[in-house]
Image: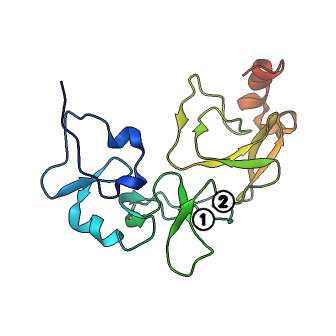
Amino acid sequence: RWRRRDSFCRPMLTRPSLRWKRRRCICKSGYVRNAWNQCVPKSECNACKRMRRMDYNLCETACPLTCGKPIPSFCPMDCVKGCACPPGYVIDSRRSSKSCVSARWCPPKCPPKAHFRLCVSTCEPRCDTPRPKTCVKRCYGGDCVCKWRYAKLFQRGKMYCVRRRDCPSRYKQLYGNFYWTLLGNGTF
C-alpha cells in the first residue's frame, strides 16, 4: 500500500532496513532523513558531507563514543545538534581531523572482563538495577558489556565488572537475590 521512500542525507551510513522501508510519512520538501531516522534540513545535512562518515543529528550526546577511549560514566543529558558519528561508528581518535570509524574496527575501551557490543540488551546484569520484566535489544549507541556471570558495578564514576555474587550487599535486595534465583542455574 505504501510506496513512498524518503531521500537520505548519507544513505551509505544508514541501516539498509531504514533506507528501504516503505513509509506512510516522508520528510517534507527541503528535508532529508538522517541515519537516526530523523527529518533534518537539507542545508544542515550538506554541512556534514565534507566530514568523513558523519551525518547531521538533531540530538547527539555531548559525550560521543571514541575509538580506544573509555566510555564516559557521566554525561550531561543535553542534546547537541551537529555532525555526529552514525549508529555503529565512533570518533576516530587516531586522525587529526574529526571523522568516524566503524566500532567493529576500533571500539571504545572497556574495563577488564568486558567487551564492546553495538547491540545491547536492557537486561544486561547490573548490581544496582532490578532485572526488567521485558528485555529490549537496542542497536543505536553500543556499550561495554560484562562477560557471562559478571555484572556491571559503578563506583566513584567508573564502571567495573564483578562476579554477580560479589555485588555489594547494599544491592542484594534490589537486584542480587532476585537475579541469582533466575540465573543461578545458568538460564537467562
**24 sits left or right of 176 in the view:** left
Rendering colour mode: rainbow
Question: Residue at left 14%, top 50%?
Answer: 28
Give the number of marks. 2
Q: Position of residue 174 (x, y in %)?
A: 71, 31
User: Along the horizontal axis of the image, is 26 left or right of 95?
Assistant: left
| Rendered image quadrant of residue 15 | top left
Q: Nearer the viewer, residue 157 or 88?
A: 88
Q: Which residue, given by chain and number where applicable, does mark 1 sit on? A: 66
Quadrant into which the C terminus falls: top right
Find numbered disc 2 in the image and state the secondary structure of the residue it sits on: loop
Q: Does residue 106 sit above or below 167 in this rendering?
A: below
- Residue in the image at 38% along x and 57% along y: 59
Residue 183, percent across and down? 78, 22
Examine the rendered structure and indicate whether residue 130 appears above or below residue 76. Answer: above
- Residue at 20%, 33% (x, y): give it: 24
Residue 34 vertical placement versus 129 (above, below): below
Q: On residue 108, which mark appears?
A: 2
Q: Amino acid at mark 1?
A: Thr
What numbered label is drawn on residue 110? none
In the image, is 59 to the left or to the right of 181? left
Judged left or right of residue 128, residue 167 is: right
**Image point 69% across, 62% down: which residue?**
70
Q: Dots 2 and 1: beta carbons under 8 Å? A: yes
Label 1 sits on a secondary structure element that is loop
